[in-house]
Amino acid sequence: MDPNDGYTYNNNGSRNGITYFKCIKARTYFCNGSIKRLENGTFVTVKSHRGHGRELGINNQGLIFNFRSVLTQRAATENIPLISIYDEEARRHVVAAGLYPWSTAESIMRFTRRSTMPYCQIHYPSWPHCLKMNNSIDLNVVMLHSLEVVTEIHADATFKVVPVNMGYHC
């Protein structure tokens, strides 16, 4: 029940043609807010609200869900810093960004990025031409391509070899 005053109400019963409503946040915020609907359909305030503000709108959960799904999709598919993704989407979805701050979005974006593996076009048996073997157990990856167009290189201290039966992931 929403009589367009910004608050949400639960039906509290009817008597003599008058329907009474109390604030949906009565238990959470100890709010005494209540209204009644007269027989002619008009709403009258019985007690004013206290302890909480007006609702921002009915579609807030939808805004947050859409914003969050865009953030997780981009975190899974793009390699730019997560804060950059959040800032770009926050400029596109200003209201949702106010409801879903970076501190909340960061954890789900990091989880999504960790749980997705990048697509690898080559598989392990075709790598011997890229590997330089020495007598130790270490493998050194040798880059055979020109580095003229490379603008950024990420080096990791670990290199995990995944067996061939893992499919197209590397």
Image (cartoon, grey):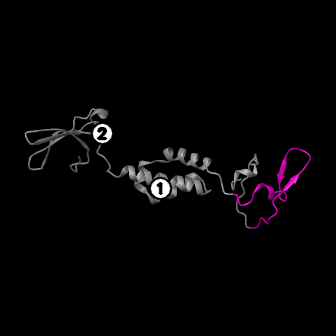
At horizontal 9% and vertical 42% (from top left) the residue drawn is 17
Residue 155 point in image, percent of width and height = 74, 52
Three-letter amino acid code at disc 2? Answer: His
In-image side of 24 versus 168 (left or right): left
Residue 54 visible in the current orientation: yes
At horizontal 26% and vertical 44% (from top left) the residue drawn is 8
- Asked if residue 158 is positioned above or below residue 126 in the image, the reply reads above
Image quadrant assignment for residue 44: top left
Residue extending farthest to the front is: 165
Residue 98 point in image, percent of width and height = 42, 50
Which secondary structure, mark 1?
Answer: helix
Which secondary structure, mark 2?
Answer: loop
* Disc 2 target residue: 52
| Segment colored magenta | 120-148
Tell me, for residue 100, which label it has, or none. none
Three-letter amino acid code at disc 1? Answer: Ala
Say whether disc 2 or disc 1 marks the residue closer to the N-terminus: 2
